[in-house]
Image (cartoon, rainbow, N blue to C red):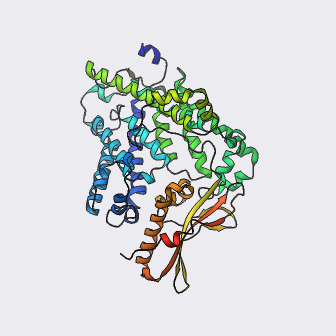
Amino acid sequence: MYQTLVKNIEGLDSRSIGLFRILLGLLLIYNFIEYRIIPAPEYFLPSNGIFGNEYLDKDQTDKFWSIFKWIRNDIQFYISVIVTLIVYLIYTIGFKSKYFGFIAYFFFWQWNQRFYIFEVGWDKYLGAMLFMSMFLPLSHQYSVDNRISKEKSFIAPFEDKSPFAFIMLMQIGVIYFFSALHKNGNLWMNGEAVKYLLADFTLARGPAEWLLQHEVLYRAATYFTLIIEFAIIFFLFIPCRMYLRILAALSIIGLHWSINLFSDIGHFKYVAICVGVLLIPSSFWNKLFKTTTKIRNSVLYRDSLFKWLYAGIAILMIWVLWINNFYRLGEKDTRVGNLMKSSGIQSVLNALRIPAFSMSSWMNQGWSYYAPDPKEFAGVMGINIYMINGDSRQVLPPPSFSEGKPPYQLNYTSNLEKYFITKTRLLNTNGYKNLRFYWAQRKVENYCLINNIPASQIDKIELVFYFSLLEEVYSLKKMTIYPELDAVLKPIQR
């Protein structure tokens, strides 16, 4: 029955899977270096990092447990970093991928748990692709395993039509399908969502100003985004249409890179390239190289016990993909969410869903970026200190504007800090008030240490928010966050 269902649907080509593994592995290494290693001296070292041991000892968040929270000194931290890079490298070159695919995902997941405050949207996307890749024949092409294998069946390219190949396709389609469903706010419906995205001065690139001057274009871009996101899942599963599969790949790459032209979206664009390469079908490679490929419908194990185990895992994955994502959709206070609540659908989904056992795991599905509408303001935190003698210092200066046009120069020590000081929920949610206080206090402590300023000479610390209401494009306002900071934030002389 299964073979009949998938007979006319393109699977995943082993050559595409091999290239996907290489690109994904390189991205894992790059992402880890940029967002975990480079900021480590200031933010992550156990001894004196802002979010080192002192912070972890105060933080008792249960759903973010991690083996890396057991790291208690800098040597252990750097050893863990080196081991992680080695694991990612082995995954990239395709050695024993059946094992190192799992190990690479485990390390990725556990580092995100350790630094959960800094888990970003593309970490979710990258993590989903890495998790799904564990069940694919990762090392059959362009790998060390392929080079050292003497089995012709292992070396020859093939089209993977196993259940997990189609679950991977389903995962990709689900990401964009639910991303579109979540975008049901007024700005998306009236065609202004892209305008608000372009007006975010913390993300805007130079061409954003030009596009903002052309209402027809940014409205068209808004609706085109929704159309493409809805269409991708259909492109993936319409039978016998090589060109639709290529169109799906180009749509994913084009969507993210066109956004990146006008707005900094981080590493989403790189994950999109990995996914686009994975989607290149066997029929494309066969036409290009004048070859033919065999089809594999089974998973790696033929033993009946493993078949049943894999079947159970496959059903569980499909269940999580659809039930958990629909549940997350109904959680939101949106048109669709309220309809699901009022109709009782949400109650049924609540009974059927499988709760995620940890917040950074693959099971915690949620693809609601810029939804139901883009935020209506953008901002960045800054810190000023005032001395007893009347002098003042800017520990974290305000953004630099040039004739009111993007791009704007934000002041930060790493890309990770840029994400932290512009994160909306950190800026305007009371639940993060203590985190803001703690971060500002430690930033001032480090500043005083570097500049030989005795803590006793500081009169007060001011945590400020430089923000722009996106209706007033590229305007800049200043607001002091919580005047009681004078009492709360006093630097400690270490």
Q: Would residue 198 appear left or right of 350 to someone viewing this image?
A: right
Q: Nearer the viewer, residue 65 or 177?
A: 65
203 relative to 352, above or below: below
What is the x, y in percent for residue 393? 53, 78
410 relative to 12, above or below: below
Q: Is residue 159 visible?
A: no
| Quarter of the N terminus within the rendering | top left
What is the x, y in percent for residue 167? 44, 28
5 relative to 255, above or below: above
What is the x, y in percent for residue 118? 45, 54
| Quarter of the C terminus within the rendering | bottom left
Q: Nearer the viewer, residue 186 or 310?
A: 186
Q: Would residue 252 appear left or right of 149 to someone viewing this image?
A: right
Label total for image? 0
**Residue 207 falls in which quadrant of the image?**
bottom right
Q: Is residue 80 visible?
A: yes
Q: Would residue 15 appear left or right of 69 to someone viewing this image?
A: right
139 relative to 413, above or below: above
What is the x, y in percent for residue 111? 36, 50
The residue shown at (69%, 56%) is 209
The residue shown at (43%, 34%) is 16
Q: Would residue 212 appear left or right of 18 to someone viewing this image?
A: right
**Residue 126 falls in which quadrant of the image?**
top left
